[in-house]
Image: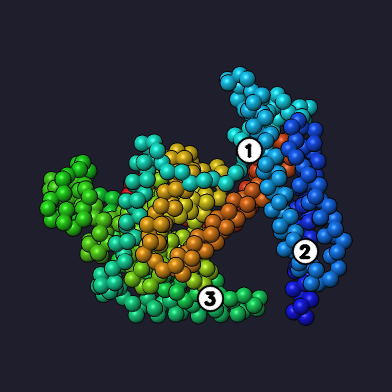
Amino acid sequence: MAQSASSSTSFEATSASQEHLSRGISILENHQSVDNVPDTSDYSATVQTLSSGQASLTHNQEARTQTTYAGTLTTQFRAILSQKRIQTLQDIKAHISDPHIELSEFLVQNSNYSDDPPPPAYSTIRNIPLVPMQPVHAKGIRFRSMLLHISTIPMQWENPGLLDEALQSVPLEHIYHEAEEESQILQAEAGSLGTGKGPAWGYQDCVARALLRWFRRSFFTWVNNPSCSRCHSPTAAEGQAVPDPDEMARSARNVELYRCIACNNYERFPRYSDPFVLMQTRRGRVGEYANCFGMLCRAIGCRVRFVWNAEDNVWTEVYSMHRKRWVHLDSCEEAWDKPRLYTDGWGKQLSYCIAFSADGAADVTRRYIRSAKYAARRDRCSEPELLHIMDEIRALHHQKLSKEDRMRLEGEHMREQRELRAFVIRELVTDICSLSVEEMADGSIRVIKGAEKSKEAEESDWLTSETSKHSSSL
Ligand SMILES: [Zn+2]
């Protein structure tokens, strides 16, 4: 059995070599019309040998010998073709008398196939894969520095000692109990459907969801204008102040100043970036929410990302082991897996959504923009430059990892890219399916009102949010 299997493989290999040779022969024949054909006696001899080779291919033993033989012949043919190509190029060079004529122009003018249209210029070829390119212009370099800076935020969460300390403030028993209950309900729901499908979310997801509820409802407080600490009256913004040494030591990048409208007392609102300081202040806007909540997700053992959006917003993503994908999570909105919240929900246009974690960075914009009408202009740098920056951050974060971990993360990155591409395909299919016959006939592309309405109705259940909050964000 083993013998016959191996001989069949040898035979296939020989066939492939022969096909390669036939192609070589036809290329050589096509070149007969060109002047100064090099000596092709080697070629004739090789063809002859090949023919005899073909005739004798009857026995297993011979087949194996022929494989080696065909390999040698292929090498010989490659050498002949290469020699011929060099000769042609040298001839062309000798023919170009005017040094100002470009080689490509000469080839077009002297082509044997002058009746055919010239090949398209490279610039007309669309959808060719992007090749990462290092940013060279000031704008791209600034964008790179900014992204590199943001990529350090989730690194602050990788401190086991501080994570344990942070967990002291979390009512773990209550959270695990809630998660257990929800997990059982989801399992019962899945069972009652009888479709053989598992529950919508796993236990770990339920823990993250319970943490989200507690964080938003009982722990962190949203602050637009801080109220007066002396008389609790509202305050009015008075601009910025320089952080004092204590505020600076506690990671405040800047301090907002407010004045009480009742007692004229000045109220300071330092914007802290250290999540462990935020565990004590327990207040802020989207930046503080995402930073502190991201750290707590890490503390309960989730893989977590800090998602930066160019339109002055940030949020979180956690990895669902159950779903094997990253899940959107907004701790200000108590939103779980609602990536269309910002676009379909709030009608915002987005340009960049970049996710950062201890494992690197990824451009996840396509998860949040599912329709071209919500896509804002991306002009912070070119797309090849952004690819380069993402690769650079990933490489920086991966350098201390083992080869196995790097491979695993690369595989995960590729799977996510596939998932994101599928969103684009789905959107295109939806748009095409909602075209009317008339529109297809006259070439105008517009989504039918009815289709839009049904789509809206389908999504309206989760598109309720407090947009007013987001007037001032980061
Ligand atoms: Zn006051």
The answer to the question of whether label 2 and label 1 lie on touching residues, with beta carbons closer than 8 A, is: no
The answer to whether residue 44 is left or right of residue 178 is: right
Q: In terms of image quadrants, where is residue 6?
A: bottom right
Residue 385's tag is: none
Q: Which of marks 1 and 3 is in front?
A: 1
Q: Nearer the viewer, residue 196 or 73?
A: 73
The answer to whether residue 70 is left or right of residue 134 is: right
**Cα–Cα span, label 2 and label 3:** 64 Å
Q: Position of residue 279 (x, y in %)?
A: 25, 65
**Cα–Cα span, label 2 and label 1:** 42 Å
Count of numbered circles on the image? 3
Residue indicated by mark 1: 125
Residue indicated by mark 2: 66
Q: Mark 2 CB in 8 Å range of ligand 1?
A: no
Mark 1 falls on what kind of element?
loop
| Amino acid type, label 3 | Leu
Q: Where is residue 276 in the image (x, y as percent from the top left)?
A: 25, 64
Q: In this view, does 237 lie above or below 334?
A: above
| Amino acid type, label 1 | Ile
Residue indicated by mark 3: 186
Q: In this view, does 372 lie above or below 401?
A: above
Q: Residue at x 63, y 38 (%)?
A: 125
Quarter the N terminus occupies: bottom right
> Dot 1, how many residues are within 10 Å of its Cα: few (below 14), some (14-19), or many (20+)?
few
Q: Which residue is drawn at 36% across and 49% down?
A: 147
Q: Which residue is drawn at 63% across and 53% down?
A: 426
Q: Which of marks 1 and 3 is nearer the N terminus?
A: 1
Q: Residue at x 28, y 50 (%)?
A: 224
Residue 198 visible from this viewpoint = yes
Q: Where is residue 289 in the image (x, y as percent from the top left)?
A: 33, 58
Q: Which of marks 2 and 3 is nearer the N terminus?
A: 2
